[in-house]
Amino acid sequence: MTRQTKDQFIAEMKKKPQTLGWDVVLAFDRNKTNYLLLQDYISRFGADSLFPPVESSIAPVTGTTHQLHGLRLDKPRLSFENAVITESRARCVMRTVGGHTIETSRPQGTTRDQVKRLGIADGLVGPVLTMTIHLKNAPGGIGSAGKVELNLSGEGAADFTLSGVDTQFEAMKLGEHLNQEIAKWNDEQKKFELSELRQNPDDALQPGTFRILTRPAAGATVRSAEDFGDGEVLLLVGIDDRQGSLPSNNTQIPYLLPQNFSSNLLISYTQLFTRMMLDELKATPQLESIQFDEQTEGGFKRYIASAGQWSIPVRLEGWDGWWFEFDTPAASFSGSSTPLSLRLENGAVVLKWAGAKTLNGKAKTTVINPPHNPEVTFTGSFEMSWDFECRFTPALDKDSEGRTILVIEGEGIKSSTSTRFIDGSGDKAGKSYLVAALPGFGERFAGEFQNLLDKLDTLSLAIDAFRLNGLLFRDETVVLPKSVDWPGDLTVLGDLAPDLTAYKLSDYEVVVNAQGTHTFTVTPANSKLTWSVAPLPGEPSGEANIGKITKNGEYTAPTAASFNFSFRRVVVTATDGTWTGKALVHLVTAPVSVFPLVNVVNLSSAEDQGYLVWAASIQATALTGTVKGNAGGTLTKTDDPDVQSAWRYKAPAVFPSDGTSKLEKVLRVDRVEVAQGGGQAAVCEMILTKTPSQTHFFKHEAVQGGIQFSFWYTDDDNQDVELANEAVEWTKVAGHGVLDEDGKYTPSTTTADHYVVVAAIDLEGGRITLWNFTILPLPLGVASAVEELR
């Protein structure tokens, strides 16, 4: 189903007021809006675009305590969803770009926490905090400095989830925990800053509260439809402290973007005429005594004069010894044949006023040495009539700063008057003089009406309406107005960002591994492009730190050492002078990442969903996942909207029985290897165990060159006893370093070592294998945040 034509849209606008009591309604194409918000996000992204690290512990969820250590969230990205107008939603996403998530559990009968799962957010893959903003419950506001904000922790924000965990229940529990963390932030941090509104205290449109709604175009939710995905974002704006109502159904307000238009500005008829224009007219001295009755005509207000008059002083010089006296004309606004009225007609507000007034006049002269009364007079009556019309039409103009503004301009259509002698009595000569004087009287009377017409003809109401685009966009000039119509509520149709959306950058956000390359392109092709790469504000510059880009758009990343083997962001910009496109580039150490890195798993049952493994690659190309090891688990591909690729690992239902060593009989490891093509694989290690000895545990301490582990047990007197090294069989289960026979672990010097898994067997345990294992996050600074593993 295609959208309305402009003519069809204008015809619908004539039927009734369409703003639901709001003073101004702005409509923007949803896809273009989301693009502009993303570009604005990239342009504003800087060193302060990461929130302070989260350090917190979440109460046990199904026996597991989730600990967040140094978890870094970037600033929220807002995008509007195509939803029914009564349930308008925005999706707000905050990605984790650094820090650790650690899951611990406490074995029954002990006071010790043991790490069972470890994941690292490395800028390529990691948990995503997603919240749904129910827009009808999330009023926007404007701060004293003009900042336009939505409150992320207000009642409109809901459905917080933190991905990267195995169940939806856990995702919601962690999301709600982070919601509580956000609530502790200061007001500046927990409000999503949409824009910054340019202040203009002299303008009549001073926005107060506003609401944002979104909805699809008619039929645009059908995948086979011509306009599939089309939608509009609506801003319902109250001026000063007024508010309208929210739509109760999707047809209560028409779709405001007809064919070939991507923006619309609606100013309600009541706001524009009743609150603004009517006051301007009544400020005209000739009309200052007018009073109106308000009537409804075709759903819109018209105004008919109910009282008041215009007194028009007219003076006329005499001649030949005759002089004249006339009643002062008082043109009634209401008691005339056509009372002064203001109504909407054919796209303009029209003022019409016609009437007639019967006046008395006298011609007088003095006779010298008269045989009777020396004063000779003639008294007569005459009619003065008028027919007056003026139109007020909207148009686009420029202010002194060159900004586009809306103006309502007066246009004098008609001002005609006539004088007609009726009758009289007295001296015949006086009659001829009085009749001869009437044209001059009428001329002056007509001149006063012409003065009024001239004044209204120059009346121009200037409205800085397009600064309201700044409620959503930082650049209020992104809208190019094309046509102005006043069928009821005034509508200004236009194009949203025609220059900024003239070309499309191939990628707006990419991940590139150290010393890797990525080629950006633009469609349609543009040979005049200039490419550049820049650091975020406050971060190191220079090619060694940010990489380089060729004139053909091929970007080469710097070495991993330049960003300390963690992550960095840079911004790539393409421009041809009139168009600019920006891409946010995430620099990471390896081309493929997995989350988590290590996970302790249980034997599976039929209803088990398995354990989630996330993966992402720098090129977002196809990834393959395989299982290698001796635990006997299986891997199944699954869908997850928050990540490039996801699998579910499922452990066997029965512990394998083919073990030859003591450790193999109690502990097995499967490596989930994820690779891109034939490249190096990223690994998530799944550790399957039988129940360890709860009386045995580990201690560790940093020593020269590494970490010294010791193995302990609690005796029958509840005393902790350290086992001698000769009584312990040490095994490095996972880790890139080396574990010697005395339990000293030396981390790798060539590969990032994020954790080590160590197992130990008490050789003095006799026929029963007394053993345990530990997962120690590295560096030790992370481990120290976890309750000591005694």
Image: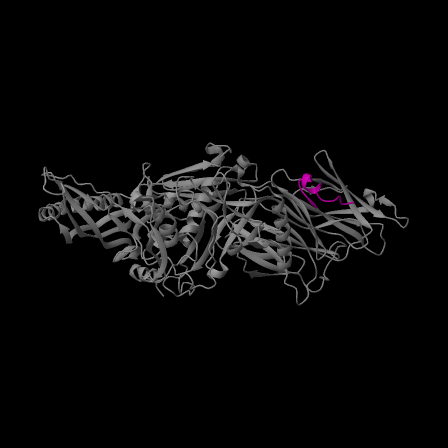
Image quadrant where one finds the N terminus: bottom left
As rendered, which of 264 and 128 lies closer to the eye? Answer: 264
Note whether residue 365 is visible: yes
- The image shows residue 29 at horizontal and vertical percentages of 39, 54
Q: Is residue 547 left or right of residue 12?
A: right
The image shows a total of numbered marks equal to: 0
Q: Quadrant of residue 745?
A: top right
Q: Is residue 493 magenta?
A: no
- The image shows residue 285 at horizontal and vertical percentages of 31, 43
As rendered, which of 32 and 636 lies closer to the eye? Answer: 32
Q: Is residue 373 left or right of residue 457?
A: left
Q: Is residue 745 left or right of residue 410?
A: right
As rendered, which of 363 and 302 lies closer to the eye? Answer: 363
Vertical arrangement, residue 487 with respect to residue 428, above or below: below
Image quadrant where one finds the C terminus: top right
Q: Quadrant of residue 260?
A: bottom left
- The image shows residue 712 at horizontal and vertical percentages of 82, 45
As rendered, which of 577 and 235 lies closer to the eye? Answer: 235
- The image shows residue 166 at horizontal and vertical percentages of 63, 57
Residues rendered magenta in the picture: 776-790
Q: How is the image coloured?
A: one colour
Residue shown at 75%/56% (left/top)? 666
Helix, strand or loop for the magenta stretch, by majority = loop
Residue shown at 67%/58% (left/top)? 631
| Residue farthest toward the right in the current orientation of the protein | 717
Q: Is residue 781 magenta?
A: yes
Note whether residue 642 is visible: no
| Residue farthest toward the front in the current orientation of the protein | 371
Q: Quadrant of residue 14?
A: bottom left
